[in-house]
Image: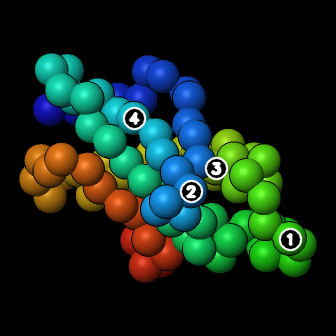
Amino acid sequence: MTLLFPNASRSLDEKRNAVRFIGHDGMFEVRFFVEAEALVIADPELGRSEISESKLLSAFDALRMSIYDVARKAYSGGRRDFYTLTAADFR
């Protein structure tokens, strides 16, 4: 099934040090996390300053389409309860 992202909301999960977002495959809600480290590596400007929730969320927004592409690729490997995207997934 095709993975879609109809809801643009995202939030910081401090416990996981990651940005949380949701996808849908038609029947199921699919949870994703992008580690903060992956956002810092992908957005060089972010790594040059003190990292905050607002900066991580802004980096997510700027990279949203590539994050969705990586999420679709991860999801194509089989359905799980949640997916954590790391810096290695963006290389």
Residue at the spot x=54%, y=63% of the render? 17
Q: Which residue is mark 1?
A: 50
Of marks 1 and 4, which one's residue comes earlier in the chain? 4
Question: Which amino acid, mark 2?
Answer: Glu
Residue 47 image-quadrant placement: bottom right
CB atoms at circles 1 and 4 under 8 Å apart? Answer: no
Residue beneath label 3, please?
A: 60
Mark found first going from the N terminus, 3 or 4: 4
Q: CA distance from mark 1 to mark 3?
A: 16 Å
Instruction: Please state if 50 lies on the left or on the right of 36 as rendered.
Output: right
Spatial separation of the CA atoms under disc 4 and disc 2: 17 Å
Residue occupying the point 18% across, 26% down: 28
Q: Nearer the viewer, mark 1 or mark 4?
A: 1
Residues at marks 2 and 1, CA–CA distance in whole angstroms: 16 Å
The residue indicated by pointer 4 is 22
> Circle 3 sits in a helix, a strand or a loop, which is it?
helix
Q: CA distance from mark 3 to mark 4?
A: 13 Å
* Looking at the image, residue 31 lies above or below residue 23: below
Q: Is residue 6 visible?
A: yes
Percent coordinates x, y for residue 73 in the rendering: 29, 55
Quadrant the N terminus occupies: top left
Instruction: Give the CA separation, mark 2 to mark 3.
Output: 15 Å
